[in-house]
Amino acid sequence: MHSLSLISDWPVDHAAGAVLTRDGGVVGSVGDLAEVYPLASVTKPLVAYALLVAVEEGAVELDQPAGPPGSTVRHLLSHASGLAFGDRTVQAEPERKRIYSSAGFEVLAELVETETGIGFADYLHQAVFEPLGMGASTLSGSAGHGANSSTEDLIRFATELLNPVLVSPELFDEATRVQFPGLNGIVPGYGMFKPNDWGLGFELRGEKNPHWTGTGNSPRTFGHFGQSGTFLWVDPEIDTACIILTNRAFGVWAKPLWTEFNDAVLGEITRTSAVR
């Protein structure tokens, strides 16, 4: 894919990425796909997927109490529990606003440990990494932002997101639908959105603008970006996923370049589909 060549002009020392489709697999890649990068908040979709597996196994339930009073697993996964970003301070009642919270994912990890008797890093490995063949992926820190992975491994995860096997279609559909519609909140690095749509661990693009995905991504696009300069999105309208890992922290450099890149990817995928 010619659009991947745009990365060579980015102000980063190392970068890798891939584009894949539901039917065609990897249609383009760039960089060393085996190189491991810190994911920062791209950790959250991986952790959320382990929670979904735990739901399928009956170890936890989406609507069981977890976190501050009145909050549930569902609230924590969708940043609607009222917990603060980095600690367990309660800043609002559940369902009042979308407060992006890494601390909430740490609460979820502890819940899984309690309910299964398995350390969460081990559970994540057993539930997600091992069955998907993600041998380079680890969780060595916070369940909100402490995972490391390679493009090669995230291709396997994105393949799962395009063709779910580890969770049921019904639960996957729930995870990629808006939870608690109408909640306003801040996307770190991008500002306030009204509403700030979120699924179960996945940010939903909705009508947000500006955004880290492309201007041409559909509102149904789901995924996550990380402050370490990483992102993963899936656009179900075109059955396409995109992964980018870099070694430069997210900042003002990334906003225009990510949008330009994602729009180039979307244009190329659309043109290729039209030819077919």
Image (cartoon, rainbow, N blue to C red):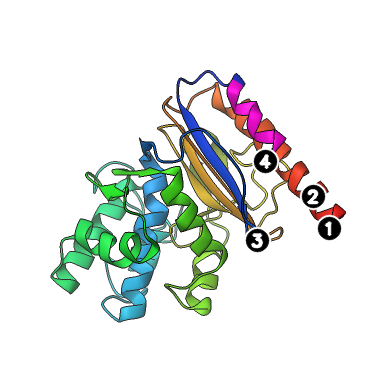
Task: Give the spatial CA distance, label 2 vs label 1.
Answer: 6 Å
Residue 159 coordinates in the image, percent (x, y): 52, 60
* Region of the chain picked out in magenta, as a range: 1-8
Residue 130 coordinates in the image, percent (x, y): 31, 62
Numbered tag placed on residue 236 in the rendering: 3
Numbered tag placed on residue 272 in the rendering: 2
- Residue matched to label 4: 214
CA neighbours of label 3 inside 10 A, class few (<14), some (14 to 19), many (20+): some
Disc 4 element: loop
CA neighbours of label 4 inside 10 A, class few (<14), some (14 to 19), many (20+): many
* Main secondary-structure element of the magenta-colored stretch: helix
Query: Is there a contact, CB below 8 Å, between mark 3 and mark 2?
Result: no
Numbered tag placed on residue 276 in the rendering: 1
Q: Earlier in the sequence, mark 4 or mark 3?
A: 4
Amino acid on which the number 1 mark rests in the picture: Arg
Disc 2 element: helix
Q: Is residue 128 shown above or below 10?
A: below
Q: Earlier in the sequence, mark 4 or mark 1?
A: 4
Disc 1 element: loop
Q: Earlier in the sequence, mark 2 or mark 4?
A: 4
Q: Quadrant of the N terminus?
A: top right
Q: Residue furthest bottom?
A: 58
Amino acid on which the number 3 mark rests in the picture: Pro
Query: Is there a contact, CB below 8 Å, between mark 3 and mark 1?
Result: no
The residue lying at 37 percent from left, 59 percent from top is 133
Task: Give the spatial CA distance, label 4 vs label 3.
Answer: 14 Å
Amino acid on which the number 2 mark rests in the picture: Thr
Q: Is residue 37 shown above or below 97?
A: above
The answer to whether residue 71 is visible is no
CA neighbours of label 1 inside 10 A, class few (<14), some (14 to 19), many (20+): few
Query: Is there a contact, CB below 8 Å, between mark 2 and mark 1?
Result: yes
Q: Quadrant of the C terminus?
A: bottom right
